[in-house]
Image: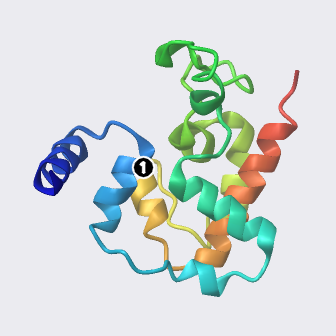
Amino acid sequence: MRLTFIENLFINCKIGTNVQTRYLCFKGMSYESESYLCDINCVQLWKALAWFRCGNMQLETVLSAWKGMPYTERLCQGCNLGKVEDEEHLLLVCPNTQKVRECFCLTLPFTHTSTLVELMQSTNTVALAKFVACCQYQRTIYPP
């Protein structure tokens, strides 16, 4: 039974089906505590980073899933790009978080080809947590 689970996990890693699976692929099968749990003393920042790493940022990909909406229709309400609002869109693409990205460009590895994995590999966990929290806040004040 366990071997089948692990085989399926690695098959899903190659496909990249969801955020949790991608995180497991990035993390490997290591079961130790994350260093950011000790590095970050602010509860709000700790939660923001934990939610990001676990794929629970309350974005349209998660919120609309409860309504039964197809994945391709879970669009960002804050911009007019017509893209699905997932972690990658909010943190790296959405025009409404562009100013936040500009504020953190010196402390986090941003380029025009940045990926979520590169962002997750950042060694500056405090800056990453602040960045994620600022993007989440910016999302709450999207224009109606």
Residue beneath the point at 50% across and 66% down = 109
Q: Work out whether residue 86 or residue 17 is closer to the camera in this orientation and state it.
A: 17
Q: Report x, y in % for residue 73.
A: 55, 13
Determine whether, in the image, residue 123 is placed left or right of residue 56. left
Residue beneath the point at 63% across and 86% down = 39
Amino acid type of the residue that numbered disc 1 sits on in the rendered structure: Gln
The relative height of residue 60 versus residue 119 in the rendered view (above or below) is above
Residue beneath the point at 11% across and 55% down = 3
- Residue 114 visible in the shown view: no
Q: Which residue is label 1 attached to?
A: 20
The relative height of residue 77 versus residue 111 in the rendered view (above or below) is above
Determine whether, in the image, residue 50 is placed left or right of residue 78. left
Q: Report x, y in % for residue 104.
A: 67, 64
Residue beneath the point at 70% across and 24% down = 79
- Residue 25 visible in the shown view: yes
Determine whether, in the image, residue 27 is placed left or right of residue 127. left
